[in-house]
Image (tube, rainbow, N blue to C red):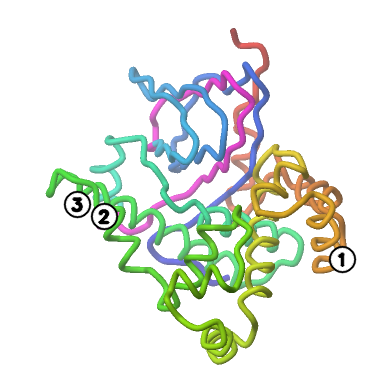
């Protein structure tokens, strides 16, 4: 099987914790852990230090480090066990992992990795684990680079990094950032100071679609993320993507062939499952810590 020769993801899971639950103190001899908080609140103890668990933050847990979690609110997480095979990358990681937690400004890449792991669980393909390795390595190195730049410049550079990778078609950014608003073609035209016909032609040439069709696609894609990774109701999700609940349900069913409720139920079937990406890690599953309830 093709795997990355610097960073290897061994295991991944989407785990939801109930209020006042957590994992008691334990450690891992031969692997690193990456805990990402989708939503919720709690605390994590690493050695003798306690950090607050916050949404959109990642927590790195080095090898042989005693750690425990406690969630004071219902919380959703993505948990990744991995190993670093490159001494050079490991050196950077160890140096920067002490300055936790790390805010993840764009969590979509991480959620996409989880979707890839689910795809591999359902329809295994030899390239998927490699894609996960490379994708996770990119996230890992981006965080390390950001922390290094913060140390050197004494200022955050998230905006600069975002600009570096910004798409060349800014209309997509405008639509993505205004999904909750009832955007019209005239709104797009006014914002970019272009004639509506020019906007339509621009979309046709660059994307092979119309602005309004793309807006619908963006809204559906964003709603799928809410359905998979949030506890918001269907009505709340419809509002978050700028649609009425009845229209949202009809549009979703037309495009996906399934209702939003049924889509959520299908997505939730993988919550809490062990997604193995390396067979050699299977023997370690018996050592996975249990979730304990009512820790107060």
Residue 181 image position (x, y, % from top left): 60, 55
Q: At 59% from the left edge and 7% from the top edge, which residue is drawn?
A: 296
Asked whether residue 278 is in view, the answer is no
Q: 169 or 50: nearer the eye?
A: 169
Q: In the rendered image, which residue does mark 2 sit on? A: 145
Give the label on residue 257, or none. 1
Left or right: residue 73 compared with residue 138: right
Percent x, y of residue 14: 64, 43
Magenta span contains residue 170: no
- 286 lies above or below 249: above
**Residue at horizontal 78%, vertical 48%?**
264
The earlier-in-sequence mark between 1 and 2 is 2
Q: Residue extending furthest top?
A: 296
- SS at circle 1: loop
Is residue 194 placed above or below 99 in the rendered structure?
below
**Span shown in magenta:** 62-89
Residue 149: mark in rendering:
3
Left/right of residue 195 with respect to residue 286 in the rendered view: left
Q: Check contact, mark 3 vs mark 2: CB within 8 A.
A: yes
Q: Residues within 10 Å of mark 1 (few under 14, many from 20)?
A: few
The picture places residue 261, in percent across and down from the top left corner, at 84, 48
Crowdedness near tag 3: few (<14), some (14–19) or many (≥20) residues, C-alpha within 10 Å: some
User: Can residue 145 be seen?
Assistant: yes
| Quadrant in which the N terminus appears | bottom right
């Amino acid at each position: 099987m093709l795997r990355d020769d610097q960073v290897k993801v061994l295991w991944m899971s989407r785990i939801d914790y109930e209020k006042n639950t957590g994992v008691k103190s334990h450690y891992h001899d031969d692997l690193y852990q990456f805990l990402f908080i989708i939503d919720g609140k709690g605390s994590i103890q690493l050695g003798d230090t306690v950090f607050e668990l916050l949404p959109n933050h990642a927590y790195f847990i080095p090898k042989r480090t005693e750690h425990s979690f406690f969630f004071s609110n219902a919380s959703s997480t993505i948990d990744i066990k991995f190993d670093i095979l490159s001494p050079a990358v490991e050196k950077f990681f160890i140096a920067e992992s002490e300055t936790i937690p790390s805010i993840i400004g764009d969590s979509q890449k991480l959620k996409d990795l989880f979707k890839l792991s689910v795809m591999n669980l359902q329809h295994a393909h030899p390239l998927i684990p490699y894609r996960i390795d490379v994708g996770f390595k990119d996230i890992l190195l981006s965080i390390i680079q950001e922390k290094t730049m913060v140390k050197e410049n004494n200022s955050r550079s998230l905006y600069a990094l975002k600009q570096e990778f910004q798409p060349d078609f800014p209309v997509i950014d405008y639509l993505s950032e205004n999904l909750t608003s009832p955007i019209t073609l005239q709104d797009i035209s006014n914002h970019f100071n272009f004639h509506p016909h020019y906007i339509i032609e621009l979309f046709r040439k660059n994307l092979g679609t119309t602005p309004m069709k793309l807006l619908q696609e963006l809204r559906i894609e964003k709603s799928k993320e809410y359905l998979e990774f949030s506890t918001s109701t269907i009505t709340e999700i419809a509002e978050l993507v700028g649609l009425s609940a009845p229209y949202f349900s009809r549009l979703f069913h037309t495009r996906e062939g399934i209702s939003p409720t049924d889509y959520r139920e299908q997505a939730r079937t993988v919550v809490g499952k062990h997604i193995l990406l390396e067979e050699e890690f299977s023997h370690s599953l018996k050592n996975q810590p249990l979730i304990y309830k009512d820790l107060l």
